[in-house]
Image (spheres, rainbow, N blue to C red):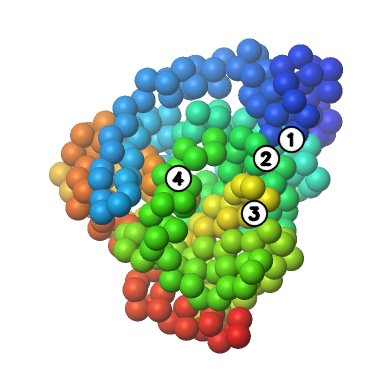
Amino acid sequence: MIDKVIISADELDKFTEGNTIADKAKGLLKQQMNSWKLLSDNYEQLSNVKVKEFHFDGFIVKVQFNPARITSSSAKVDAKSIKERKCFLCVENLPEQQRGIEFNDYTILCNPFPIFPEHFTIPKISHTPQKLLSNFAEMLNLAKALSRHYSVFYNGPKCGASAPDHMHFQAGTKFFMPIESDYENFIAENKSIVTSENDYSLFTINSYLRNIIVIESSVKSKVIELFNNFYSAYEELSGNSEEPMMNVIASFENDVWKVFIIPREKHRPDYYFAEGEDNILLSPASVDIGGVCITPLEKDFNKITKENLESIFKQICLTDEKFELLVKNLKQTVL
Ligand SMILES: [Zn+2]
C-alpha cells in the first residue's frame, strides 16, 4: 500500500537540488505544487495571509490570519468523534495526488493546509496512537536529517494534534517560529540552568510568557537521557497513566540538538469556548507557543490583543507553581 504513495527516485530527482533528506523534502514540495491543486491553491493563499506582531519585553509574538486552518483549529478530538471518522493519516485514506518520502518507519508528506512557507506532516506508517516517549529518538533523527531547511515538532494527543490516534510529527521552515530566533539573544540572556556539563545543558527560560524547558546537546544519547528524566518527573507530577500534556519542538543546528519542551495545563483556553464577543477561535499547539498564533477567523485576527495572548499562554501552559515543582522533581532525578 505504502509503495503507491512513495515518490519514485526519478520523479523526485527532477525537482531536487542536493542530497540531504531536507533537500528531498523540498523537492517533494515542488513536485506536489505541480501536481496537486488543493495544495498549490492553499500555498497561494498562504502568500496573502495577514500577520500582526506584538512586542513584549525583548521578544515578539506573531498572529497569523489563516482561514485554511479552520478544520484543524476546530477539530473534534474526543474519542467518539475520532472513532467515527476515517483516519486521514493512514496510507489508504491519503488523497490520490499525495506523494511521500520514506524515513525509517515514517513517511514525509506535504501538509496541504500550511502555516509555514514549507510545511510537512510526518506520520508513522502504522496506525498507532500519538505518543512521544517511545518515538523521541526518531524525532531527533528527523530533526538532524531535515536540519538544512526545517525544524520538527510534536503535538500531544490533547495539545493540538488533530489525529491523536495516529502517531505523527510535523516539520516546517527553520526560524519561522520566533522561539528559534530568540534562542541566540533573549533566551541566551534569560536562562536558568537546571543541570549542565561541557556537552549538555537543561534549562528554563525566565519571563517568556510560557514555562518552557530546553535541552541542548551534541550527544544524542544525552538528549534522550535528559528527556527521559524530564518525562518521569512530569509523569509523576501529572499522576495519571496517559502521556502528560506537552508540545515539543526540536531542531539541529551546528551539530547541536535544541529541544523545547512545553508542558501543558490545558488543551484550549477559555476564549475558545466563550460565547459572543468574548469568543476567540485559537487552539494552541507547538507553532502557536513557538510564537506564531493562528486565528482561522478574521474577526479574531482583528480584535486579538496583547493581553489576550498573555492570558492564552498563561492558561494553556503549566502554572508557575506546578512548573516549579516539576523543576524541583527534575533536579532530583538528574543529580
Ligand atoms: Zn491512521
Q: Residue furthest left?
A: 277
Q: Quadrant of residue 232 in the image?
A: bottom right
4 or 2: tag closer to the N-terminus: 2
Image spot of residue 199 (x, y percent): 66, 66
Q: Mark 2 touching mark 1, by CB under 8 A?
A: yes
Judging by the rendered image, the residue that carries numbered circle 1 is 21
Label 4: which residue?
A: 181
Which mark is drawn over residue 146?
2
Quick one: 17 or 120, which is closer to the camera?
17
Looking at numbered disc 4 in the image, what kind of residue is underneath it? Ser
Alpha-carbon distance for marks 3 and 2? 13 Å
Q: Residue at x 62, y 73 (%)?
A: 197
Residue 139 visible in image: no
Instruction: Identify the residue shown where x is 74% and y is 35%.
Output: 21
Amino acid type shown at disc 2: Leu
- Could you tell whether 233 is left or right of 159 in the image? right
Q: Quadrant of residue 264?
A: bottom left
Tag count in the figure?
4
Give the structural element (helix, strand or loop) at label 1: helix
Q: CA distance from mark 1 to mark 4?
A: 23 Å
Q: Which mark is residue 256?
A: 3
- Of callouts 3 and 2, which one flags the residue occurring earlier in the amino acid sequence? 2
Q: Position of residue 289 (x, y in %)?
A: 41, 52
Mark 2 and mark 1: Cα distance apart in space: 6 Å
SS type, badge 4: helix
